[in-house]
Amino acid sequence: MTQELILLCFVSFFAGFVDAIVGGGGLIQTPAMLIILPQFPIATLLGTTKIPSLSGTAFAAFKYSRKVKIDWKLLIPIIFTAFFGATLGAYCITLINSNSIKPVIFVLLIGIAIYTYSQKTFGLHQEKDLPFTRQLLIGLIFGLVIGFYDGLIGPGTGTFFVLAFISFLGNDFIRSSANAKYANVGTNIAAIIYFAKTGHILYEFAIPMAVFNLCGSFLGIKLALLKGNKFIRIFFLVIVSATILRFGWDIFIRRA
């Protein structure tokens, strides 16, 4: 158990680092849990990852908010809808086969990667000035949808939030990363409540991992704020590519 815990803490540190910059820490942390602790049910492993994810994401959100102006009037309703969506998704995972949704997300991610790469100014500066009511409506919709995805499947949620804030609300990468962290806090809390109630959290692993995830988040946020939008754009493309590979593995190789 000691060796397993040490490995998971190192993994959680790197996941926190990646997640703080542009999301996607779950792409690292979740597979590691499945490999290192195969003796536990998948639901228990997924529940356990949510506590370290929350610690790093909440810390990153706080640090971003000290450097980036947050529109709380817009963001708070989005957080609540993301929370509700994640709760609904966690419930629906017992009713829906999440594997049937993965091919759709796989194709969508390829489109995202191509578009982001081809649009050299994508996310590098504020691009849209929408009326507040329109921003709110759009934000509530994607908050609900991405929150539902997080409860149902999970990996890449933070990255999807970053993309949504850029594409639909015209934020730059740094502002999108800040907003995405708060929305992701909402989905993580919803998942923790659900998994805790059903007894699917291994606290002896989750709490030490949370400490290391927070430390990785501290390093990631420092680097993101130092390097700025261009660096985050490159990192975003790397994480989207990693997400494509992950879903490609699930769809074409693991099913075979």
Image (cartoon, grey):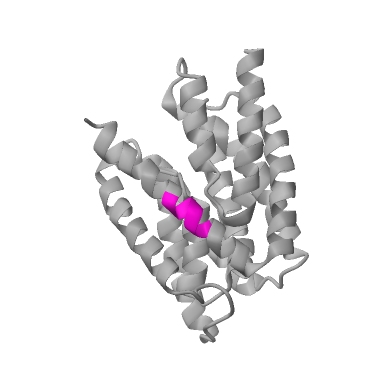
Name the residue nearer the viewer: 110 or 70: 110
Above or below — where is 223 with respect to 1? below
Query: Residue 213 location, x and y as percent?
Result: 67, 39
Question: Residue at coordinates 46% horizontally, 26% vertically from top-left?
Answer: 34
Q: Which residues are magenta?
A: 236-241
Q: Tell me if 102 is positioned left or right of 115 in this view.
A: left
Farthest-out residue, left: 256
Above or below — where is 87 with respect to 30? below
Q: Tell me if 203 is positioned left or right of 143 in this view.
A: right
Above or below — where is 55 with respect to 209? below
Question: Residue at coordinates 60% horizontally, 68% vertically from top-left?
Answer: 230
Q: Visible in this render: residue 95? A: no
Query: Residue 136 location, x and y as percent?
Result: 51, 75
Query: Residue 144 location, x and y as percent?
Result: 44, 59
* Residue 97, magenta (yes or no): no
Q: Magenta stretch: dominant SS?
A: helix
Q: Visible in this render: residue 161? A: yes
Q: Quadrant of the C terminus?
A: top left
